[in-house]
Amino acid sequence: MRHREVEVEAEYVGRMETGADWREEIEALAAAESVDAGWFTAIGAVRAAEVWFYDQREQEYRAVEFDEPLEVAACVGNVSLLDGERFAHTHAVLSRENGQALAGHLDSARVFAGEVHLRAFAEPLERTHDERTDLDLWLND
Ligand code: ZN
């Protein structure tokens, strides 16, 4: 495993705007506080969501759309720089009215309500292309 030490510079809490995009709200918080690297958790509810699954054999994302009210039972991710822009790599477990769980890489979702906790690191993290996975990963050479 590649690793490095990080220092927590600050922590923020936020409440997302109803009707906004879930991931963009996290990126907007990071932009507002100039956070180039961090780790976050969030909870809440959304009205619709697009979840991606990475097909490891084909090395491409497949999108699945859900157009229904969903609980964001758990959301975790990180903030880093991708092509010079702040990117919130966001994963979530969503639950349906009957309690059934859906999960994956959360690309977008329309916020009903959301609460986020962002832990900001002092040093930026940059994503670059990784040959073996065809993904943009951090801590590359
Ligand atoms: Zn992901």
Image (cartoon, rainbow, N blue to C red):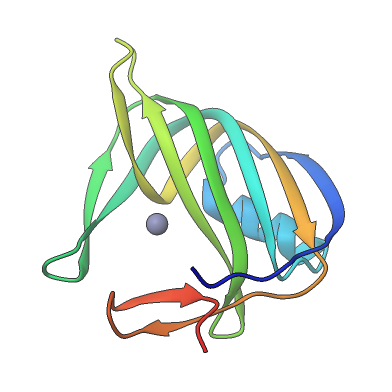
Q: Residue furthest top?
A: 98
40 and 72: which one is in front?
40
Question: Looking at the image, can residue 21 be seen?
Answer: no
Q: Residue furthest right?
A: 9
Q: Position of residue 133 (x, y in %)?
A: 28, 74
Left or right, residue 86 beside residue 122: left
Identity of the residue drawn at 27% across and 80% down: 132
**Depicted 137 relative to depicted 71: above or below:** below
Q: Position of residue 22 (x, y in %)?
A: 54, 46
Identity of the residue drawn at 33% across and 47% down: 50
Q: Residue furthest left?
A: 57
Identity of the residue drawn at 72% across and 71% down: 36
Numbered marks: total: 0
Q: Position of residue 113 (x, y in %)?
A: 60, 29
Q: Position of residue 25 (x, y in %)?
A: 63, 51
140 and 75: which one is in front?
140
Question: Looking at the image, can residue 121 be seen?
Answer: yes
Quadrant where ligand 1 appears: bottom left
Q: Residue furthest bottom?
A: 141
Left or right, residue 27 beside residue 134: right
37 and 140: which one is in front?
140
Rendering quarter of residue 3:
bottom right
Rendering quarter of residue 117:
top right
**Depicted 141 relative to depicted 135: above or below:** below
Identity of the residue drawn at 57% across and 46% down: 20
